Amino acid sequence: MERAIGIFDSGVGGLTVFAAIRRALPDESLIYLGDTARVPYGTKSSETVIKYSLQCAKFLVERKIKALVVACNTSSAYSLPILREKNNIPVIGVIEPGAKKALSATKSKRIGVIGTSATIGSNAYGCLLKEYDAGVSVVSQACPLFVPLVEEGWLNNEIAKNTAKIYLESFKHENIDTLILGCTHYPLLKPVIAEVVGSNVGLIDSAEAVAEELKMKLAEKRLLNKKSGPSAYQLYVTDLPNRFEKIASDFLGGKIPSVKRIEL
Ligand code: DGL
């Protein structure tokens, strides 16, 4: 069997990246790990996020993956350098592709970023955006309650709407024209976020940009799957699979592979 691509996130959020990769690279087999026993990562220290990320990567690398996608902004913000240093395969994070996509979308050069407390605290987006374009203004806001809402499957109810209103209020007078969804859970709340920020603000979901970057990297390293045949998808979680299965099947649509629980 051809080697698979490994993808991990703290929970269900990385499925937004899984779905984009499945669309962009339909001939590739994918192994997804959601660390649901320890979600959220976004409220934890950098040391803890790095430790958990190394454990997730180890599980996937032991399955002989040919590339690793860190489908979590929090983990990308803190652990990409060490994951790259320790693993001799391409390691793709979500922050660089998202930042590039935002810069190509903005006209006013006023960009908003939302993410977990850890991602916003790291200022990973702010630094990168300024490195790419010193003339850009960046306004950031942590939205820690968005992740539990998504994990609970509350994507479009009153509580989700009111939470979004409170968090996104601060952008009202900032005149941003682009908002980076700097957490892979947030695209699942896109309709609610879009309603609150209004149609003048473009929402940047880095999932597609990540899939494109992965495709380029695999082509460059001659790692693209040559045999076209049925692709295999494996889904793993670190706690009870029931809720993950429900959100995964609503979000991915159709029949999803059975979800296996593992220990890290
Ligand atoms: N989905 C993750 C992210 O992109 C993390 C959410 C969390 O575990 O706090 O940051």
Image (cartoon, rainbow, N blue to C red):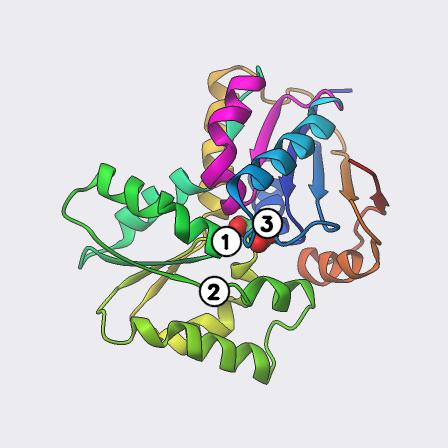
**Which is nearer the eye, 41 or 161?**
41
**Which is nearer the eye, 145 or 180?**
145
Discs 2, 1 touching: Cβ within 8 Å? yes
**What residue is shown with label 3?**
41
Left or right relative to 56: residue 137: left
The disc placed on residue 5 is: none
Q: Amino acid at mark 1?
A: Cys
Q: Amino acid at mark 2?
A: Cys
Left or right relative to 1: residue 15: left
Left or right relative to 175: residue 179: right
Q: Amino acid at mark 3?
A: Tyr
Farthest residue to the left: give it. 135
**What residue is shown with label 1?**
183
Q: Is residue 187 above or below residue 71?
A: below
Whole-number angstrom distance, CA of label 2 to CA of label 3: 13 Å
Specify the segment rendered in magenta: 63-86
Q: Is residue 113 above or below residue 161?
A: above
Q: Position of residue 228 (x, y in %)?
A: 69, 26
Q: Quadrant of the C terminus?
A: top right
SS under mark 1: loop
Q: Position of residue 202 (x, y in %)?
A: 34, 63
Q: Quadrant of the N terminus?
A: top right
Residue 71 lies in the magenta stretch: yes
